[in-house]
Amino acid sequence: MSSPGSRRNSYRGAACGSRATFEYQVRRRSSSCSYFASGAQTGNFSVRLSQPIFTVTLRFLLAIDLWLSKRLGVCACEGSAWGGIRPLVRLVEFSGHVIPWLIGTVYTLLRGRSVEEQEIMLNLALALILDLLFVRLVKTLVRRRMPAQNRSEILSTFFVERYSFPSGHASRAAMCARFFLAQLVDTDSMRLLVVGWAALVSLSRLLLARHYVTDVGFGLAMGYCQYSLVERLWVTWNWLQDALLIGLGERLNRAYDGLWMIDGKH
């Protein structure tokens, strides 16, 4: 059996060990907090002062972009602050996806009852394809990674999105909203509904932490400008029919010329 003195010494040793461990953890936490709170900021700020003003301004704006985007990602997962409305936000997000828009546009084009309706749907389909190509080109050039909070969904397995800048949903929403306002909408209530839809789709990308704020902002500006290009390159139904007939006539003429050459050789 151990003596009272040995037990007392063991208790003191255990107490000293636990106290030392606690003090080490406290010093570690305080040192890390002080590093992120004061030391790191001071060191980074001193380094930034030696850099050009453009670089300092750009890094400052990017820091605000990262902070604001992280604060807005309240529906990134079920355990987030607003995780309860995540299914509703995802439904709004899906309303701006390119697949349902292309399917709906092509279906309306094929089922159109008038030439004017078919012409509008044709140009809308071309505008969606143009937007998809422009967004893909910019994403490939910039190669900005998506936020770390982003959570992969079922659609990600079929349509892998590796890059974040710009937001294709925001670009598509702005382009479609301006298209509808110029071509189809003629009442104030519908105008408000279209603009509200575009704003909600863009906001859903931030709430779900799919994109940064600058991604969505640039996407909106990009989509707004894209409609100006679509309006300049507007394809009329008569022009399309003439182009198809001219192309078909040229192919038939080439085919007849080939047949005549074959007959001449025989």
Image (cartoon, rainbow, N blue to C red):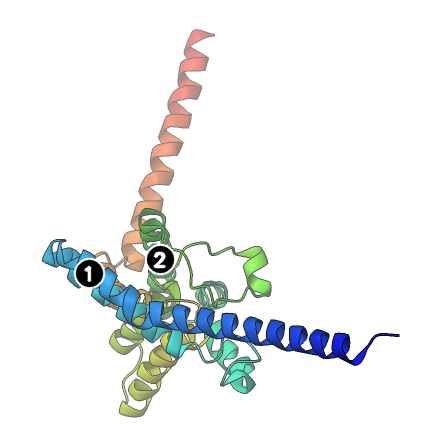
Residue designated by label 2: 126
Q: Nearer the viewer, residue 263 or 217?
A: 217
**What residue appears at the point 61 percent right and 71 percent down from the top-left corner?**
17
Residue 122 image offset from top left, x and y in percent: 37, 61
In contact (CB < 8 Å): disc 2 and disc 1: no
> Which residue of the protein is positioned furthest toward the top in this rendering?
266
**Badge 2: few (under 14), some or many (20 or more) residues near its Cα, within 10 Å?**
some
**What residue appears at the point 42 percent right and 64 percent down from the top-left corner?**
147
What amino acid type is highlighted by mark number 1? Answer: Leu
Q: Quadrant of residue 247?
A: top left
Q: Seen in the image, is 39 located left or right of residue 254?
A: left
**What residue appears at the point 47 percent right and 7 percent down from the top-left corner?**
266
| Mark seen at residue 58 | 1
Q: Nearer the viewer, residue 35 or 129?
A: 35
Residue 60 image offset from top left, x and y in percent: 21, 66
First of labels 2, 1 by sequence position: 1
Q: Tell me the element at label 2.
A: helix
- Rendered position, 175 above or below 158: below
Note whether residue 175 is visible: no
| Mark seen at residue 181 | none
> Which residue of the protein is positioned furthest toward the right in this rendering?
1
**What residue appears at the point 63 percent right and 78 percent down from the top-left corner?**
15
